[in-house]
């Protein structure tokens, strides 16, 4: 099986470990229904769930090109489980600005870039 979604990765790991969805739910501190939704690709995990998912899997399941500032920002948010709004507060900009950086629409100005690079 070649997993394409986070739910696919979770299901593959769960099956490899011979675990029930309840076991994974307990490990990730979510409901069993949440695991079912993820595995059936009906729902996607929220960013705050990513750190525990990454820990459970033992790897980062999302391929992110960290050569760009947008990729580095997204990778940082995944590893730390924070949304764009929270990251924006950390670097003292608007959430829409962080979204634009991630999409590669704009580059951070020198002051913002300095604050951002301290985090990354």
Image (cartoon, rainbow, N blue to C red):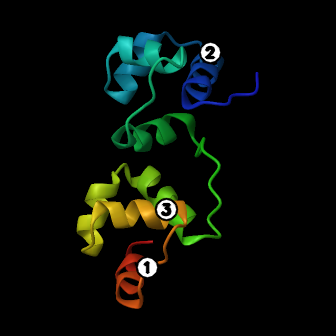
Would you say the residues marked 2 and 1 are in contact, meaning their CB atoms lie under 8 Å apart? no
Q: Residue furthest front?
A: 105
Whole-angstrom CA distance, mark 2 to mark 1, is 43 Å
Question: What residue would you read off at disc 2?
Answer: 15
Q: Residue furthest bottom?
A: 110
**Residue 26 location, quadrant:** top left
Q: Secondary structure at mark 2?
A: helix
If the image is split into quadrants, where does the C terminus sit? bottom left
Question: What residue would you read off at disc 3?
Answer: 102
Residue 93 in picture, x, y percent from top left? 27, 72
Compared with 95, 49 (above or below) is above
Residue 13 in picture, x, y percent from top left? 61, 24
Residue 22 in picture, x, y percent from top left? 40, 11
Viewer-nearest of discs 2 and 1: 1
Q: Secondary structure at mark 1?
A: loop
Would you say the residues marked 2 and 3 are in contact, meaning their CB atoms lie under 8 Å apart? no
Residue 90 left/right relative to 111: left
Would you say the residues marked 1 and 3 are in contact, meaning their CB atoms lie under 8 Å apart? no
The residue sitting at 49% across, 9% down in the picture is 20
The residue nearer to you, when weighing 2 against 25, is 2
Question: What residue would you read off at disc 1?
Answer: 108
């Amino acid at each position: 099986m070649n997993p394409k979604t986070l739910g696919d990765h979770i299901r593959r790991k769960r099956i490899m470990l011979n675990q029930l969805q309840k076991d994974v739910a307990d490990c990730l501190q979510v409901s069993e229904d949440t695991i079912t939704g993820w595995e059936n690709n009906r729902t996607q995990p929220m960013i705050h769930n990513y750190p525990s998912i990454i820990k459970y899997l033992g790897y980062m399941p999302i391929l992110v090109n960290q050569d760009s500032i947008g990729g580095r920002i997204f990778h940082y948010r995944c590893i730390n489980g924070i949304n764009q709004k929270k990251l924006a507060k950390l670097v003292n900009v608007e959430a829409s600005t962080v979204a634009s950086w991630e999409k590669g629409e704009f580059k951070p100005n020198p002051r913002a870039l300095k604050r951002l690079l301290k985090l990354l």
